[in-house]
Image (tube, rainbow, N blue to C red):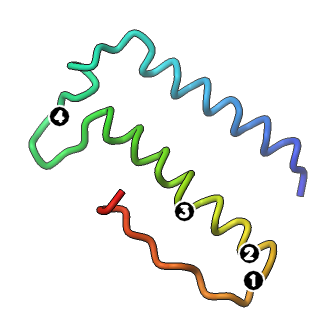
Amino acid sequence: MNLDYFIERFSKNRNVFEALVRGMSLEQARWKPTPNKWSTLEVVNHLYDEEREDFCQRVKLVLADPAQPWPHIDPRRW
């Protein structure tokens, strides 16, 4: 596995997300196309929560002790 490749790709993704929301007002970020769809703000918060609460934890677990069961996640609580 080429870690440098993945680090570079993930770094570029950050720039893409920043460009998508740059200049967006809070009102625009909170707008929902329909009541049951997510706003831009909710999507960004979800990505942040997944990164902080789930993804990093699971990568560390897989690398440190792959036989351990994965912890339960609770995205609704986030």
Q: Indicate which disc, 4 or 3, sits on the residue closer to the N terminus.
A: 4
Q: CA distance from mark 1 to mark 3?
A: 15 Å
Q: Tag 1: residue type?
A: Pro
Number of numbered tags placed on the structure image:
4
Q: Nearer the viewer, residue 13 or 68?
A: 68
Question: Marks 4 and 3, how far apart in space?
Answer: 25 Å
Seen at 40% across and 48% down, the residue is 46
For marks 2 and 3 on the same chain, the one whose residue lies earlier in the sequence:
3
In this rendering, is residue 43 above or below 21?
Answer: below
Q: Quadrant of residue 39?
A: top left
Please tell me whether mark 3 sits on a helix, a strand or a loop.
helix
Check disc 1: other Cα within 10 Å, few if <14, some if 14-19, many if 20+. few
Query: Mark 2: which amino acid?
Result: Val
Other-residue count near label 4 (Cα within 10 Å), few / some / many at <14 / 14–19 / ≥20: some
Select label 4 or label 3 by which is in front: 3
Q: CA distance from mark 1 to mark 4?
A: 39 Å
Residue at the farthest front position: 77
List the residue tagged with mark 4: 32
* Residue in view at x 34 percent, y 14 percent: 24
Mark 1 = which residue? 66
Q: Earlier in the sequence, mark 1 or mark 3?
A: 3
Residue count near mark 2 (Cα–Cα under 10 Å), binned few <14, some 14–19, many ≥20: some
Dot 1 or dot 4: first in sequence order is 4
| Whole-percent x, y for residue 44 in the image | 41, 38
Q: Which residue is mark 2?
A: 62
